[in-house]
Amino acid sequence: MKEYKNTGNKDTRSGFGDGLTELGRSNPNVVALCADLVGSLKMQDFIDENPERFFQVGIAEANMMGMAAGLTIGGKIPFAGTFANFATGRVYDQIRQSIAYSGKNVKICASHSGVTLGEDGATHQILEDIGLMKMLPGMTVINTCDFNQTKAATIAIAEHDGPVYLRFGRPKVANFTPEDQKFEIGKAVKLYDGTDVTIIATGHLVWEAIQAAVELNEKGISAEVINIHTIKPLDEEAIIESVKKTGCVVTAEEHNFLGGLGESVARTLALNNPAPQEFVATQDTFGESGTPEQLMDKYGLNAAAIVKAAKKVLNRK
Amino acid sequence: MPDIKELQDFATQVRRDILRQVHKVNSGHPGGSLGCTEFFTALYKVVMDHNTDFDMDGKDEDLFFLSNGHISPVFYSVLARTGYFPVEELNTFRLIDSRLQGHPTTHEGLPGVRIASGSLGQGMSVAIGAAQTKKLNKDKHLVFSLHGDGELQEGQNWEAIMYAAGNKVDNLISTIDLNGQQIDGSTETVLPLGNLRAKFEAFGWDVMEIENGNDLQQVIDGLNEAKSRTGKGKPVCIIMNTVMGHGVDFMMHTHAWHGKAPNDEQLENALSQNSETLGDY
């Protein structure tokens, strides 16, 4: 079984910051906005190198989204950064009307998504953002799994003409995808071939899915693992092909089971290849304070939960 | 510049267009549209340096953003009659498969529209963004925006007002259509706006007033005066006093015609007060 090596824990938000810095050097049309969270979003290097291309809007996310829409008129490519909660729920109508419906080329860059934001608690831990964003016509939704992938995705979305929601997180997590990867929007990445069960994971749950597959393998269960970094547009072909082979699926995400990756996968399968599915996700609940590890454990968002779900779904085949 | 008589004839025809658009589909917003007819006429016929061969990026031309999108009938009429799209297309206002949606949008590709509006309070932020891009592009042209007075009850405006002053967005002219009316009644009864001039000034804007926003010459002079105040470190706000429903006696001085179309008889009466000048579509 292939071994995925963690080259050292790193936060995905730093991947975003590094990607943005690189874009600052390579693409003169890229501009950035932030709502008083420059340090948290790791945007300082971009700002130092391109002060005239950075807009500090203060604690005013609605204005930030509107300004980002306006900045596109005249050819700029705005990257608007804040916490996922404030980048979606707080400004849903601004994104809907001024960005999505208006077809503006804005990149919404959302850090601190999910429960792994940790101690700040549920006011800051959004678990509904994938759903909110994927429902907007024309919106591309990406949830990256590690530092390298987040950096690659940040660079890639500048080349995509249209609104994008890029979701990443706060904690330092395993960095295991290739440093030189080519990030293809809408393209699934297969991590393991398997025959018994398909595990489809996104974001922080991808590393957990790898651990789960190793554990399942030791028990004689062959798991196929797919990293879905793009939730919309979904790589339906990769999902259908895999589940046709394995006959059942576990989806894993740091998000409510309502509105998340799991539901998108379920729809794809219902239409094309119905199969038993288990959902590793939060169960229609808010989060709470705690360390990221404690929260992932309490809310059933780790390798152990994926293994359990895989066994359950195998029994339903 | 066309002479004032020509411009007044233009405005009269626009008023007919507004009334006929909303009458045909028995919906839409005539009140604010009629009140802002002189503003749109002045802006598009005299004040703005703009290109009717529409390009979304709008480089090297002045830009306009309508924040209170419900007054789409006046916007559409003026865009059509200044050459952005065929005047006959006004016939499709609010109909299925039309580019002339109830509220303006870029989504159907209507030339002249650069942002969707309708959900209120978002236009100033967009205008600020576009103004900042003009600065980055070293484009000396200006950005204009229009806002309803009731619309200022939306909090996003005040985020934008604070930003524009704090960041010296001095290539922006935002006009407030002060007609004192909103859907549920007067702004005074629904939610008083207080002293708007003092508020904008306290935020750091250069504020001026157009005493009668339904006097074409005053609007032209006011907008030109505003242009002369740009580039001096402050965003410019024009508080423009208008009468909702102006030009149709029974629609004036009331919120009743904010979002209501005239019936056949009322249309005939209204049109008789605004005789055909440039030809109905």
Image (cartoon, rainbow, N blue to C red):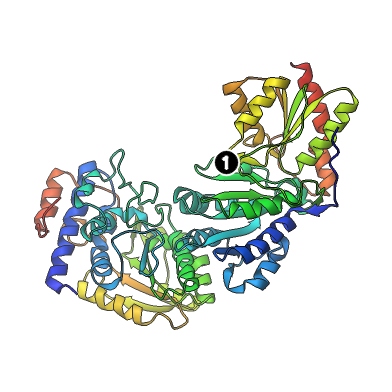
Q: Residue at x 16, y 63 (%)?
A: B10
Residue B45 seen in the current view: yes
User: Callout 1 environment at 10 Å: few (<14), some (14 to 19), or many (20+)?
Assistant: many
Write down the chain letter for disc 1: A
Residue A129 seen in the current view: no
Q: Nearer the viewer, residue B230 or B204?
A: B230
Q: Residue A178 in the image: x percent, y percent? A: 76, 48
| A285 lies left or right of B72 | right
- For the image, the number of numbered tags is 1
Q: Quadrant of residue A255?
A: top right
Q: Residue B196 in the image: x percent, y percent? A: 41, 72
Q: Is residue B146 above or below residue A280?
A: below
Q: Residue at x 35, y 52 (%)?
A: B104
| B277 lies left or right of B77 | left
- Amino acid at the residue labelled 1: Lys
Q: Nearer the viewer, residue A251 or A235?
A: A235
| A13 lies left or right of B250 | right
Q: Quadrant of residue B143?
A: bottom left
Q: Residue at x 52, y 43 (%)?
A: A136
| B275 lies left or right of A10 | left
- Residue to which mark 1 is pinned: A134
Q: Residue A300 in the image: x percent, y percent? A: 80, 36
Q: Quadrant of the C terminus of chain A?
A: top right
Q: Residue A182 in the image: x percent, y percent? A: 67, 47
Q: Is residue B168 above or below residue B130?
A: below
Q: Is residue B198 above or below residue A103?
A: below
Q: Quadrant of the N terminus of chain A?
A: top right
Q: Residue furthest right?
A: A218
